[in-house]
Amino acid sequence: MPARGLRTLNSPETTSSSQVSPGNGSHDVVVVGGGVIGLACAWRLAEAGLQVRLFERDTVGSGASNVAAGMLAPVGEATWGEERLLAMGLDSHHRWGTFAEELVAASGITDIGYLQLGALHVGMDRDEVEELERRFDLMRELDLAAEWVTPSRARDIEPGLGPSAGAGFFAAHEAAVDPRQLTAALAVAARNAGATITEHVEVAGVLTGADGRLTGVRSADGTEHSASIVLLAGGAWSAADWLPETVRPPVRPVKGEILTLKERLGEPVCSHIVVSERVYMVPRTDGRLVIGATVEERGFDSEVTAGGVLELLREGYRALPDIFEMELVETTAGFRPGSPDNMPLIGASESLPGLHFATGHYRNGILLTPFTADTVAAQITGGEVPEEAGPANPERFNTATTGKVES
């Protein structure tokens, strides 16, 4: 991450922050999007001494951040062909402990729900166990930290498992965070560092100079907001029509429904993250249990469906029957920002100088928050950019520079 107090922009064409007049509405960076990614980037950039203003179309955290389960589980998510994404996840997982400590200190919010719970993956029938065996073989090939567990060992870890639960694997170091508490802390930390956060402002257009460089944005009321750099962190809404069509990122909404239950009998149904083939369950410190999440390609259809709720409850009950006694306190749906290769877009646009991206995180937005924020801050201030960020270059989708569209 960049050194504190640094106030330079990493481009010879960029107006340096020392040349921006604080009183004329100009900023070093305008961030578009107030989810955890946008807020974390705003915090790190403001910490580095830049003048930062963030615009959120609704309220901060109202998008995917509001409905995420908050798993920090790169090992459990490892799959074939996504080794580059796994490297980013492992790097970010390593950053999370320090990131959480610094966030607590910067915000004064002492509980962001960050817990190193460990994640237990169990098969609920023979086919699921065989699939977990295949995945565990991959983990061994990649030298990932996980333990194969027998059914009896799985019940030692989680006594409340259902009778059909079989073998699986346990990743003891995996963790979780409460995304809503995380969002609140990031907003306070960003403001404390000097960032300006403005809610209920829709960005409607871009400002460009005579040389074609992006010089800011225009909000829906016609107000112009000058900036040396515009950071697009709009999640599923990142492919916005206010951007020139040639630079719109290939990001789409992927719907996910999620449930929140609350214990009524005083005893938590589990003490670890519990994952089966069709559902994952994440306990919170206050007795809630988050069950997620469906995956549907339905555009911006935000309705919670009876089928989605039934699937989550049915599969959750198979793994942990004691959820039957819990109170159902919330059902909601959100939109993950999917990209063609499931990897995020983090970096500068070559087609429109001055535009940077931090979007397309799909299922890994919470996990990749420290990695993304530190990478963006390093890219903009001239710090050391993690090697693992290379594959997230947004230009990989630009046919003008690559000659083809990667998928």
Image (cartoon, rainbow, N blue to C red):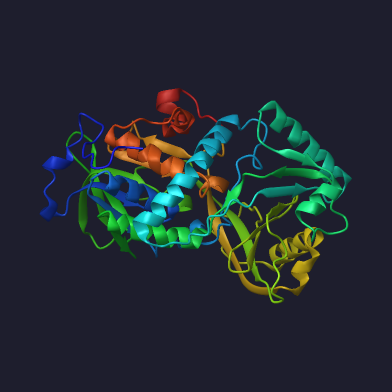
Q: Is residue 83 above or below residue 53?
A: above
Which residue appears at 21% of the width and 53% of the height?
Answer: 225
Judging depth in this view, the residue of 303 and 317 nearest the camera is 317
Residue 12 pos. (x, y %): 20, 28
Q: Residue at x 41, y 62 (%)?
A: 109
Residue 110 visible to the viewer: yes
Report the quarter where the C terminus lies. Answer: top right
Figure quadrant of residue 98: top left
- Residue 60, given in percent of the width and then of the height, sits at 40, 62
285 displayed left or right of 107:
right
Drawn side of residue 233 relative to residue 21, left or right: right
Q: How many marks?
A: 0
In the image, residue 292 sits, relative to residue 228, either above or below, namely: below
Find residue 354 and report its horizontal and vertical position in percent: 27, 38
Nearest the camera: 366 or 344?
Answer: 366
Q: Residue at x 58, y 63 (%)?
A: 333
In the rendered structure, the answer to whether residue 107 lies left or right of residue 4 reads right
